[in-house]
Amino acid sequence: MTHHKKPEISKRLARIEGHVRGIQRMVDEDKGYPDIVQQISAVRAALDGVVEVMVQDLVEHYVSQSRDEKGKKVAIELKDTVSNIF
């Protein structure tokens, strides 16, 4: 990781951590499964967002380091493809 986006990643992970603690409280308080599953789904989406930021950071690093135009083009296409997955 290039660590360019480390602060953003850290913030996202801290929010996710708080969210997971909230899910644990919901379980402890015997909340309904539909509500708990909805919150778990939100955490999964948030984790996907973290992966997307990491991939973007890595690809941006490769693009900035590449002297080869073809290599830059491939890296940008990879970034776009991965972004469409998440």
Image (spheres, rainbow, N blue to C red):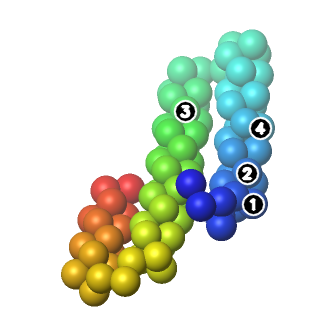
Judging depth in this view, the residue of 4 and 33 nearest the camera is 4
Secondary structure at badge 2 equals helix
Identify residue type, mark 1.
Pro
- Which residue does the numbered mark 1 point to in the structure image? 7
**Residue 41 in picture, x, y percent from top left:** 49, 38
- Which residue does the numbered mark 3 point to in the structure image? 40
Number of disc labels:
4
In three-dimensional space, the C-alpha distance between marks 3 and 2, rounded to whole angstroms, equals: 20 Å
Cβ atoms under marks 4 and 1 closer than 8 Å: no
Instruction: Tell me the residue at 75%/13% (across/down).
Output: 28
Above or below, 45 against 27 in this view is below
Secondary structure at badge 3 equals helix
Above or below, 47 against 57 in this view is above
In three-dimensional space, the C-alpha distance between marks 4 and 3, rounded to whole angstroms, equals: 12 Å
Going from N to C along the chain, the mark reached first, 3 or 2, is: 2
Instruction: Tell me the residue at 65%/67% (across/down).
Output: 4
Secondary structure at badge 4 equals helix
Relative placement, left or right, of 11 versus 53 is right
**Residue 71 in picture, x, y percent from top left:** 27, 76
- Which residue does the numbered mark 2 point to in the structure image? 10
Secondary structure at badge 1 equals helix
Res 18 label? 4
Cβ atoms under marks 1 and 2 closer than 8 Å: yes
Cβ atoms under marks 3 and 2 closer than 8 Å: no
Above or below, 18 against 31 in this view is below
Going from N to C along the chain, the mark reached first, 4 or 1, is: 1
In three-dimensional space, the C-alpha distance between marks 1 and 2, rounded to whole angstroms, equals: 5 Å
Instruction: Tell me the residue at 33%/60% (across/down).
Output: 82
Judging depth in this view, the residue of 20 and 8 nearest the camera is 8
Quarter the C terminus occupies: bottom left
Identify residue type, mark 2.
Ser
Above or below, 57 against 31 in this view is below
